[in-house]
């Protein structure tokens, strides 16, 4: 079920923008990722419930050897599939596929935990070990789901990119600082595999439209080297003569203050 949800969401999110969805369908992936992490949470709660029931009503384990073999085989298959899905998810920046990979990985840990507990119970006859190990695994699974939820859900409410990502983008913009006066109203958000970046760029009012256009193109190309799926909007503002005069006056005042303190220190 979870894999089917991920498959459908990835297909929909990859559809190009249309008249009803001018910003594309990327958030479908985030919806899918959120649903999958919630399903993992529910599975974790259910495992804990069953484990508590087993602690209160212990039962002898039947066919432990067969159970161990089946669990180990299932864990191996799910691990291989999970690694393949996660690798592809990292390549295409798909949160839905990451969620699905985590879902498969939870099956791996669950199978290994069951196999380990069956082995211990078969060797020691300590039936309480099975539910205790199960609860530990359930808590681990829920913790991993919570970490992924923090990645899947925020884009649904247009949360900004991570501080590290924003610092990287702003460092790229600052690399062109000799060619513009300043930038402001810097905003970012994510939708599926795409990052949306926009800011206002103030340039000298005497700069030609062609030069400004080329500058914006170079900034965008540099950002997209690091964020290949980024959609970038740069709003260019010319500096007016009044603003230019204020800036020069402020610079002169600042320079005068520096000179004054330098002479008197």
Image (spheres, rainbow, N blue to C red):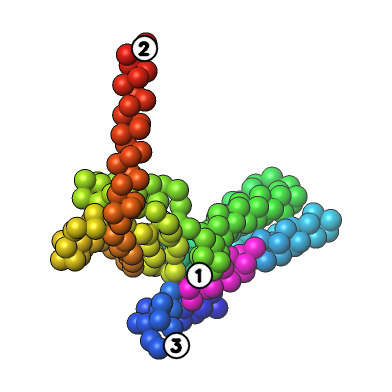
Task: Determine which residue is flagged by label 3.
Answer: 20
Local secondary structure at mark 2? helix
Looking at marks 2 and 1 on the same chain, the residue that comes earlier in the sequence is marked by 1
Q: Residue at x 30, y 57 (%)?
A: 240
- In the image, residue 30 sits, relative to residue 19, either above or below, namely above
Quadrant where the image shows the C terminus: top left
Residue 242 seen in render: yes
Residue 234: x percent and y percent? Answer: 32, 63
Residue range in magenta is 27-41
Residue 30's tag is: 1
Residue 63's tag is: none
Local secondary structure at mark 3? loop
- In the image, residue 216 sits, relative to residue 123, either above or below, namely below
User: Mark 2 against mark 1, which lies toward the viewer?
Assistant: 2
- The residue closer to the viewer here, 159 or 239, is 239
Residue 121 as seen in the image, left or right of residue 160? right
Residue 17 as seen in the image, left or right of residue 180? right
Secondary structure that dominates the magenta span: helix
Q: CA distance from mark 2 to mark 1?
A: 60 Å
User: Mark 2 against mark 3, which lies toward the viewer?
Assistant: 2
Pointer 3 local density, CA inside 10 Å: few below 14, some 14–19, many at least 20: few
Task: Determine which residue is flagged by label 2.
Answer: 264
Pointer 2 local density, CA inside 10 Å: few below 14, some 14–19, many at least 20: few
Local secondary structure at mark 1? helix
- The residue closer to the viewer here, 86 or 218, is 218
- The residue closer to the viewer here, 191 or 71, is 191
Residue 220: x percent and y percent? Answer: 25, 61
Q: Which image quadrant is residue 178 in?
A: top left
Q: Residue at x 19, y 66 (%)?
A: 209
Residue 186: x percent and y percent? Answer: 41, 56
User: Mark 1 against mark 3, which lies toward the viewer?
Assistant: 3
Q: CA distance from mark 2 to mark 3?
A: 66 Å
């Amino acid at each position: 079920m979870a894999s089917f949800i991920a498959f459908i969401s990835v297909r929909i999110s990859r559809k190009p923008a249309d008249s009803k969805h001018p910003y594309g369908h990327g958030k479908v992936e985030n919806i899918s990722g959120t649903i999958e992490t919630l399903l993992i949470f529910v599975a974790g709660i259910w495992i804990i419930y069953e484990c508590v029931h087993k602690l209160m009503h212990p039962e002898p384990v039947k066919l432990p050897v067969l159970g161990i073999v089946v669990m180990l085989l299932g864990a191996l298959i799910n691990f291989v599939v999970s690694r393949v899905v996660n690798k592809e998810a990292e390549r295409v920046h798909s949160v839905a596929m990451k969620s699905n990979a985590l879902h498969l990985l939870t099956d791996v840990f669950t199978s290994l935990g069951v196999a380990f507990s069956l082995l211990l119970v078969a060797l020691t006859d300590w039936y309480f070990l099975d539910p205790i190990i199960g609860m530990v695994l359930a808590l681990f699974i829920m913790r991993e789901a919570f970490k992924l939820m923090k990645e899947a859900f925020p884009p649904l409410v247009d949360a900004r990119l991570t501080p590290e990502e924003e610092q990287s983008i702003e460092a790229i913009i600052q690399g062109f600082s000799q060619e513009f006066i300043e930038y402001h109203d810097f905003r970012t958000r994510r939708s599926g595999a795409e990052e949306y970046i926009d800011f206002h760029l103030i340039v000298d009012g005497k700069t030609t439209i062609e030069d400004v256009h080329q500058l914006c193109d170079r900034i965008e190309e540099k950002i997209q080297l690091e964020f290949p799926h980024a959609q970038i909007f740069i709003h260019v503002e010319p500096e007016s003569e009044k603003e230019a005069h204020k800036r020069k006056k402020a610079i002169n005042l600042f320079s005068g203050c520096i000179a004054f303190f330098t002479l008197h220190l």
